[in-house]
Amino acid sequence: TGFIQVGSCVMALPHGKRNNMDAPRTFEATSEAQHQFREMPHCYASMSKKPLMPYSPNAHRSRLAMEDAPVPLKNASSIQFNDRFCVHKRRFVTTHQNTFTGAQPKMTSNP
């Protein structure tokens, strides 16, 4: 870019051509999702010869070792067919059986 003087005329020089006009730019970096969910080697804090990586406060190499999940017994079912909030002892009792238990009425609250 610039100017050139030809005789008494001042003329402008055009910009140069781009070298790689047809070559598309490729994405060489990793996205945030790829960075967060990439496959990590199994590392923990007390491990010897951990692989080096950039500092991160949540790095796997800084975490304590965790125990393996317990293996369920063979042929054991983990399905429970009851509700935690359901009292099974008095589940199918009628209103009469719930209210009239046969106890003597207490007259202390209403003499």
Image: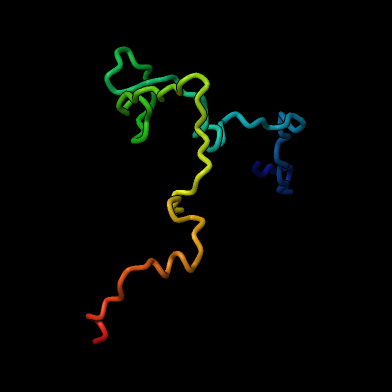
Location of residue 26 with respect to 106 vertically, above or below? above
Q: Residue furthest toward the top?
A: 49
Q: Which residue is at 43% across, 65% downward?
A: 98
Tell me which corner region of the image, top left, top right, bottom left or bottom right, holds residue 23.
top right
Tell me which corner region of the image, top left, top right, bottom left or bottom right, holds residue 14.
top right
Left or right of residue 98, residue 79 in this image: right
Q: Which residue is at 73% across, 46% downward?
A: 11
Could you tell me residue 10's position as x and y percent?
71, 48
Left or right of residue 68, residue 48 in this image: left
Q: Quadrant of the N terminus?
A: top right
Could you tell me residue 81's position as x and y percent?
53, 42
Looking at the image, how many numbered discs can be counted on the residues?
0
Could you tell me residue 20's position as x and y percent?
72, 29
Instruction: State the residue in front, 91 or 55.
Output: 91
Instruction: State the residue in front, 34 or 24.
Output: 34
Q: Residue furthest toward the right?
A: 22
Location of residue 82 with respect to 21 vertically, above or below? below
Q: Residue furthest toward the bottom?
A: 111
Tell me which corner region of the image, top left, top right, bottom left or bottom right, holds residue 62.
top left
Instruction: State the residue in front, 89 or 38.
Output: 89
Location of residue 107 with respect to 88 vertically, above or below? below
Q: Which residue is at 24% across, 87% downward?
A: 111
Could you tell me residue 51's position as x and y percent?
38, 17
Instruction: State the residue in front, 109 or 4.
Output: 109
Q: Which residue is at 42% across, 69% downward?
A: 99
Left or right of residue 90, residue 12 in this image: right
